[in-house]
Image: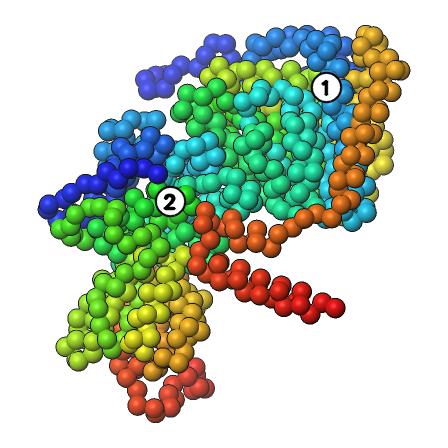
Amino acid sequence: MTAIADHPAPSSAGPAGTDLLPSGDPWQLIDPAGRPTAYIARDTAGDAGSLPPGSTLAELYRRMVIGRRFDAQATALTKQGRLAVYPSSHGQDACQVGAALALREQDWLFPTYRDSVAIVTRGVDPVEVLSLLRGQWHCGYDPHQHRVAPQCTPLATNTLHAVGLAHAARLKGEDTVALVLLGDGATSEGDTHEALNFAAVWKAPVVFLLQNNGYAISVPLAKQTAAPSLAHKGIGYGIGGELIDGNDAAAVYTTVRAAVDRAARGDGPTLIEALTYRMEAHTNADDATRYRDRDEVTAWLGRDPLTRLEAYLRATGELDDAGAGRLQAEAEAFAAALRERMNADAPVDPADLFAHVYAEPTAALIEQRRSLFGELREAAEEMP
Amino acid sequence: MTTTLDSVSSTAVTMAGALNTALADALAADRRVVVFGEDVGTLGGVFRVTDGLAERFGEDRVFDTPLAEAGIVGTAIGMAMNGLRPVVEMQFDAFAYPAFEQVTSHLAKLHNRTRGAVSLPIVVRIPYGGGIGGVEHHCDSSEVYYTHTPGLRVVTPASPADAYRLLRQSIDCPDPVIFLEPKRRYWSREAAELTSAGPAIDQATVVRPGTGVTLISYGGTVATALEAAAAAAEEGWDAEVIDLRSLSPVDDQTLIRSVRRTGRAVVIHEAAGFCGYGAEIAARLTERCFHYLQAPILRVTGFDIPYPPPMLEGHHLPSTDRILDAIARLQWDDEPDQRWLSPGGARA
């Protein structure tokens, strides 16, 4: 046998990179019945993964209750014609809230259109969050204020923005991590591949949280990939992949938090696949009964993220009827305030059409604005 | 804004050299400027435009990326969101197409989407056009894909001195800029002072004054238009030549002033004529100068074909002869033009 001198000998510890593979079963801290699971230590990256303190779990629960109420209110506003469209994240509450709360103040969130609850949890004004779906303006909030990028509609394109922002932070010597949210469908897009590869090559401080809800609108995962799991894709890039129960807020929170810490330490990116389920249709305009069995939906009802954490908190004494009542009241007040503000007509200004295309409007845009304003003046004068 | 740190070249400099100096001066003037793309580091770019920059400024400021154009533009967007001023290179015109979604859906729109809260001061450098004997996918004139996208600035230099000026201006610009470099002029030489002073980023320049007809061009065909103007002078036609420099926004005022004076205009570019940049110029000038025109505005462009192989590209590229023919057709004496309604629909 001839040795190939240029190639390193295979490790005796097994095929190279096996430590990057996800666990066989999704990692879980609290089971669907609300019981703490036997898993208390992580395998892949060597980070401790025990249950967060009771106060953190209580906060995760509180934010999920508010988030779900927000989601229901947004769906109702769509039915009333106040929103053009709303993609619900009901069922993915643990991912939404766990991810947002795991971020530090200085970190950035790169959400998609289905991640309104994560953005609200991050602290952005819910009316500003709904600006896009209300049809008022494409992005209603200042991304720099809460370090939340605009909600991304072209799938997977935001993964590259997150990698770039994270890499710039490293170049500038800043302690900033970028967390990007994507779904199972987005993993088929080329930009996801490029982002994972750039992130790994640059060792960028970025975390990919992949909410695998089983469907890209109507197309099931089996038609999207032949990979054993989406977390397995990490190894091809040299990125550690983690497979977790995405309906377990404790597991989402601790896993994202550990990945953020790892990225901040300079140990590079992590790909987290969170198994979850979208309980509603893709949007209000979609009919999910055309592609999902009722039995399947019912089965996922039994794995509800809120029910499970509530059961755990009641069992440990962190939550009682009075506390649950206060929480419901808080969520109702949140929804009522949102409803009231959303029922007011949204102010829009035609001048905005021309003001921000460039840093300064071009001569042609100034002329077009003048023309539109002329039309509007004439229309106003013709009004009885 | 950065301080101007101009370089003076006493000897003749090539366009590639002037671009290299512009990048070096921008990197020296502003810590936020980073330069990256495929082969731009160690190799110095396939056209050597980034030659020596990685060595001089270090791998944190000038670096090679994985071979993925959407990745290059997409990460540049994230970097700009975090305060950097990326200057990225697409290796060739047609190899920039994988980045198209990032360019059109994000680079062009993010400032508008966020009502100005997020600026993307990014320059995407793209060597473009033919005339270098390049095989397929290396010679596209892709300018209108970008000019048709609001939110982008699109500029292209025609000379070494202006290449330096426009690139410095583009890097200082708060808007995203598609910077199209005419490959066939990379090795053209000019003895000139390299300075960012002079016409602003959105101004066209009259590169040859004249009174009888306005030749309007940009990038690689400005030199062709100047040659044609020199030849036309021998036939008694006094042609003015305008170098547009900025394709978006376009400097209407310089065009209007010239064409109202000359009453005749020819637009010249390499790209296909159908829905090409010349169509926009002809329409704008017709709208703005109709009563001053002595003849319809003509276009001399590439044929409506995929870019031809090297041994046939000479037939495709606008030539001085074709420009002279167009000028001749503008000198008409009120005879109706019989050309366009023939059953075969043959071209002129």
Distance CA(mark 2)–CA(mark 1): 44 Å
> x%, y% of residue B68?
43, 39
> x%, y% of residue A99?
64, 24
Q: Amino acid at mark 1?
A: Leu
Pinpoint the chain carrying mark 1: A
Quarter assignment of residue A34: top right
Q: Is residue B267 left or right of residue A339?
A: left
Specify the color scheme: rainbow
Q: Is residue B341 above or below residue A268?
A: below
- Disc 1 target residue: A60
Q: Is residue A280 visible?
A: no
Q: Is residue B184 above or below residue A158?
A: below
Outermost residue toward the right in this view? A321
How many neighbours does mark 2 have within 10 angstroms: few (below 14), some (14-19), or many (20 or more)?
some
- Secondary structure of the residue carrying numbered label 1: helix
> x%, y% of residue A381?
67, 68
Q: Is residue B74 above or below residue B298?
A: above
